[in-house]
Image (cartoon, coloured by chain):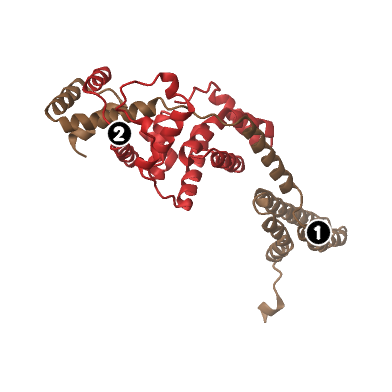
């Protein structure tokens, strides 16, 4: 999940006003503050680092030239993520991606049937990140966007709906369906693990 | 959506109520397939919950700022010789349109100097007319400024409409009608 950004809304608002008045350094502050959030979203949606960099650039350029249209009642981060997600979904649609089979894309090491649980450090590694990426790529772009915004940014259904310009109920059913699709690709673990997990959750 | 699926999904987003937990527990205990489905959903949820956050490369911000600086610089310069020529024509047309107004105003003032009552009326009319002309120019310049970044050609074209707008407005105010219209 994303690390917390400590910059206050008032400071962000100041930067936005200064940037509107032509202060490029103020926009650079906004960029430094939110670039990771935008880049991660683009990477998770597009699945390729070079393309994610390009999409991040485009998203910030769009934000820069539309700063006057920014509604100060909204969160700037939500606004810029909305620009980025729409841009990425457009790209994916234009690309007319053919969705690869999960059996081909997920390496055997991801199987949950393994008797030896992986250490947490390994889960946070690049390899794991790539595996998750492969899983995401089995989803349609709009499903993927809902999953990324829910899990990486911890947004509520209402916030995701605002970002993707859809209804809350549509986002909810999209997220449910996305989880279902991913779950169908999973291998169950032992009953013992399952019940332990169930008890922890409840 | 089926009740059991709804409960399973909702449990992933927020803790269920005691009643819902009991309901789900019964469903899972009675139906091994549902228990298996729920296990898979939990694994998906666990996997996504600890997914790493990708950081932007350090050079990215610099690249973006360089692109913005380049783009702003390109927009502040006239984009072509045609733009410069259009701007010059626009300024000259405004001058041409404003000149007769100023000459006319001066002529009226000189002629009414001998008659204090006429002079007062003329001064008032000239002042009102010039104020309106300035306002029209001001409004059109503001509008041109607003769109000049997105569409410099249209902004310049707007300026070229200034003389026509001014002359039409003055004609209307002074009640000058085209001879063709009268005939």
Q: Which residue is mark 2?
A: A186
Disc 1 vs disc 2: which is toward the camera?
2
x then y, percent, for residue A36 = 54, 30
Q: Residues within 10 Å of mark 1 (few under 14, many from 20)?
A: few
x then y, percent, for residue B176 = 71, 69
- Say above or below: B165 vs B11: below
In the displayed structure, does residue A157 sit left or right of residue A130? left
In the displayed structure, does residue B118 sit left or right of residue A52? right
- Say above or below: A144 vs B22: below
Question: Viewer-proximal residue, A47 or A92?
Answer: A47
Hue used for the chain lettered A: red
| Image quadrant containing the C terminus of chain B | bottom right
- Residue shown at 48%/34% (left/top)? A78
Question: Viewer-proximal residue, A10 or B77?
Answer: B77
Q: Residue furthest bottom?
A: B183
In the displayed structure, does residue A147 sit left or right of residue A49? left
Q: Which residue is mark 1?
A: B88
| Image quadrant containing the N terminus of chain B | top left
Q: To which chain does the residue with label 1 belong?
A: B
Q: Is residue A161 visible?
A: no
Hue used for the chain lettered B: brown
x then y, percent, for residue B3 = 18, 34
- Say above or below: B97 vs A201: below
Query: Mark on residue A117?
Result: none
């Amino acid at each position: 999940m994303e690390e917390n950004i400590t910059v206050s809304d008032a400071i962000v608002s100041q930067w936005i006003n200064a940037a509107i008045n032509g202060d490029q350094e103020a926009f650079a502050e906004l960029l430094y503050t939110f670039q990771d959030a935008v880049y991660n979203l683009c990477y998770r949606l597009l699945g390729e680092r070079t393309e994610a960099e390009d999409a991040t650039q485009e998203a910030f350029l769009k934000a820069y030239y539309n700063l006057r249209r920014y509604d100060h009642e909204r969160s700037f981060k939500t606004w810029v993520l909305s620009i980025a997600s729409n841009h990425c979904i457009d790209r994916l649609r234009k690309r007319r991606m053919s969705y690869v089979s999960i059996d081909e894309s997920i390496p055997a090491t991801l199987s949950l049937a393994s008797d030896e649980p992986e250490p947490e450090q390994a889960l946070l590694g690049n390899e794991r990140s790539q595996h998750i990426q492969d899983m995401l790529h089995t989803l349609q772009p709009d499903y993927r966007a809902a999953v990324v915004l829910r899990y990486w940014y911890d947004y509520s259904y209402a916030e995701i709906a605002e970002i993707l310009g859809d209804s809350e109920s549509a986002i909810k059913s999209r997220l449910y369906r996305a989880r279902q699709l991913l779950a169908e690709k999973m291998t169950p673990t032992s009953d013992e693990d399952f019940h332990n997990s169930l008890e922890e959750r409840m | 959506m089926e009740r059991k699926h709804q409960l399973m999904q909702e449990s992933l987003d927020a803790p269920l109520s005691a009643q819902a937990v009991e309901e789900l527990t019964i469903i899972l205990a009675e139906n091994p397939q549902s228990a298996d489905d729920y296990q898979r959903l939990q694994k998906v949820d666990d996997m996504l919950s600890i997914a790493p956050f990708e950081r932007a490369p350090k050079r990215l911000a610099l690249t973006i700022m360089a692109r913005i600086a380049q783009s702003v610089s390109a927009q502040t310069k006239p984009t072509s010789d045609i733009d410069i020529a259009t701007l010059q024509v626009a300024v000259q047309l405004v001058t041409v349109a404003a000149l007769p107004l100023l000459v006319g105003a001066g002529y009226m003032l000189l002629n009414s100097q001998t008659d204090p009552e006429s002079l007062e009326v003329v001064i008032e009319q000239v002042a009102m007319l010039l104020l309106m002309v300035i306002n029209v120019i001001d409004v059109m310049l503001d509008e041109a400024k607003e769109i000049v970044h997105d569409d410099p050609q249209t902004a310049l074209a707007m300026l070229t409409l200034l003389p026509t707008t001014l002359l039409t407005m003055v004609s209307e105010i002074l009640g000058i009608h085209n001879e063709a219209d009268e005939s």
